[in-house]
């Protein structure tokens, strides 16, 4: 089980074309999704997301109305104050959680979710649904195969997705 983030970034980028080819290949074949779910459960059980928190450093968190309400209530803030203090719109106009400012000399890599403190989420008990379901292997909209397009990118920063993709390639006898 690979968990070193530097190696995952390097190998995930190296395997990107292969992962995209795998995505196309798997969509053209029929598999019992249960075996993929079992692999995801096993790998998620072996890796502690809260020790990594790389997703909080790399991704933007889209918010649903229920997330806004839940977080505002959790923080004891009026809805509008929560929106003003902790959210912004992305380039497509979608409501997302703010990110911290990157430290000088770190570029975008120094930015992270505004609620990340070290590797700890300060609103973990009220985290948005997208955070709770991440990396969307076991829970997400649609079938696992329909979500495959997301995994080539996630395999460059998420140890769970990286290891799961490699396991599923082996399960399906995909030619690398």
Image (tube, grey):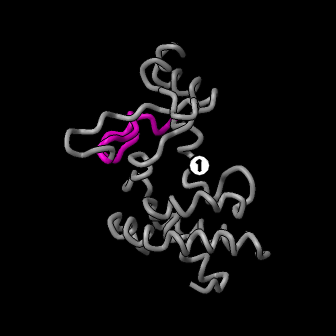
Is 166 rendered above or below residue 55? below
Label 1 residue SS: helix
Q: Which image quadrant is residue 116 in?
A: top left
Residue at 67 percent across and 51 percent down: it is: 140
**Count of number-bearing discs:** 1
Q: Residue furthest left?
A: 105
Q: Residue 163, how many percent across, how many down?
A: 50, 71
> Looking at this view, is 176 or 173 the one in front?
176
Kindly give the residue lying farthest to the right in the view shown.
Answer: 30
The quarter in which the C terminus is drawn is bottom right
Magenta residues, start to end: 109-126
Residue 27 picture location, percent across and down: 74, 69
Residue drawn at x 69%, y 75% is: 25
The residue positioned 63% from the left and 26% from the top of the image is: 65
Say whether residue 154 is left or right of residue 122: right
**The one of 136 and 8 positioned closer to us in this rendering:** 8
Q: Position of residue 113 (x, y in %)?
A: 40, 38
Taking the magenta stretch, the answer to whether it contains residue 115 is yes
Residue 156 lies in what quarter of the image? Answer: bottom left
Would you say 139 lies left or right of 14 here?
A: right
Quadrant placement of the N terminus: bottom left
Q: Is residue 175 above or below residue 137?
A: below
Judge left or right: residue 100 versus residue 168: left
Q: Residues within 10 Å of mark 1 (few under 14, many from 20)?
A: few
Q: Which residue is mark 1?
A: 133
Q: Residue 8's spot in the image, x, y percent?
A: 40, 68
């Amino acid at each position: 089980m690979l968990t070193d983030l530097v190696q995952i970034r390097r190998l995930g980028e190296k395997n990107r074309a292969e992962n995209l080819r795998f995505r196309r290949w798997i969509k053209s074949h029929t598999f019992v999704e249960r075996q993929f779910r079992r692999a995801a459960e096993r790998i998620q059980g072996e890796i502690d997301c809260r020790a990594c928190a790389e997703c909080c450093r790399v991704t933007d968190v889209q918010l649903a109305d229920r997330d806004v309400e839940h977080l505002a209530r959790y923080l004891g803030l009026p809805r509008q104050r929560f929106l003003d203090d902790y959210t912004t719109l992305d380039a497509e106009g979608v409501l997302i959680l703010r990110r911290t400012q990157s430290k000088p000399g770190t570029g975008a890599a120094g930015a992270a979710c505004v609620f990340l403190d070290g590797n700890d989420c300060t609103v973990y008990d009220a985290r948005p649904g997208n955070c709770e379901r991440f990396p969307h292997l076991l829970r997400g909209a649609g079938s696992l195969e329909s979500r495959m397009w997301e995994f080539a990118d996630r395999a460059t920063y998420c140890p769970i997705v990286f290891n799961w993709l490699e396991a599923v390639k082996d399960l399906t006898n995909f030619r690398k």
